[in-house]
Image (cartoon, rainbow, N blue to C red):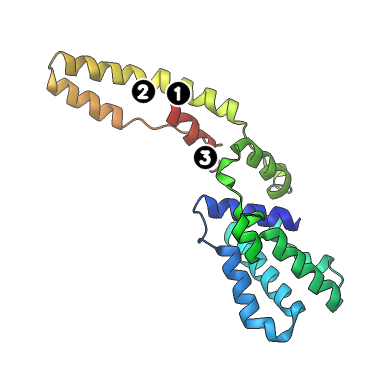
Amino acid sequence: MLLNKFVFAQTLEDHALIPFRFLRDKYEEARRLWGPKGTAKVAEAFLRGVDEWFYAFYDTELFQDSFLEHLEQDPKNLEDFLLAMEEILGFGAWQATFGQGLLHYNYRAIDEDVFGKAYETFLAQGRKEGGIYYTPSSLTALMAKMAVEETLWPRARELDRALGEERYDEAEARARDLTQVAFLDPAAGREASWSKSSAKW
């Protein structure tokens, strides 16, 4: 559960959907504010701060429960946990130097189908009853190709023909017609796959 949260956050950061250095800044803030009170307070402030912000902003079940509830609240255990978390995330100087840890991975390189499946598995667990599903990119690519070929290409060819024959008034009308085309997909969700697929055509 905790790693899923961090991967989700870093993926959003890599796509510039949340502030740069979000997790690192939240962690440094927790260290600065709560360090004198001990490791337990640092871990609590960091994890609760991340959970509260993401749950309020993205309203996803992934951040509804705190990982702290699953940790033994022994000071030594919390200290070991915090050290392990720093290493896994890549907060340490060694990890930063050698690009090790979750913070240093390029999440833009992951295919959107992987995130779609992760969305279905972790983020929309309780939403399937409401009809929320992820559409595989192979299907959205086909839909985009068909929409472009049947709607945009004929208009673009007419515009090109009018320009080639120097019928500029008609070309202007064709261009205006082309810019008025809109596609409606009521089940598009965030439309990432649709946008990516349609850009190819």
Assign the N terminus to one quadrant of the image: bottom right
Q: Amino acid at mark 3?
A: Ala
Q: Is residue 79 above or below residue 94?
A: below
Q: Residues within 10 Å of mark 3 (few under 14, many from 20)?
A: few
Q: Amino acid at mark 2?
A: Leu
Q: Nearer the viewer, mark 2 or mark 3?
A: 3
Give how far across and how far down residue 47 sits, in percent. Answer: 70, 68
Q: Residues within 10 Å of mark 2 (few under 14, many from 20)?
A: some
Residue at (13% x, 17% y) in the render: 167
Q: Which residue is mark 3?
A: 192
Alpha-carbon span between mark 2 and mark 3: 20 Å
Q: Are marks 2 and 1 in contact (CB under 8 Å)?
A: yes
Nearest the viewer among 19 and 173 is 19
Which label's residue is closer to the chain start, 1 or 3? 1
Task: Indicate which disc residue 152 carries.
Answer: 2
Task: Indicate which disc residue 147 carries.
Answer: 1
Alpha-carbon span between mark 2 and mark 1: 7 Å
Which label's residue is closer to the chain start, 2 or 1? 1
Q: To which quarter of the image does residue 120 belong?
A: top right
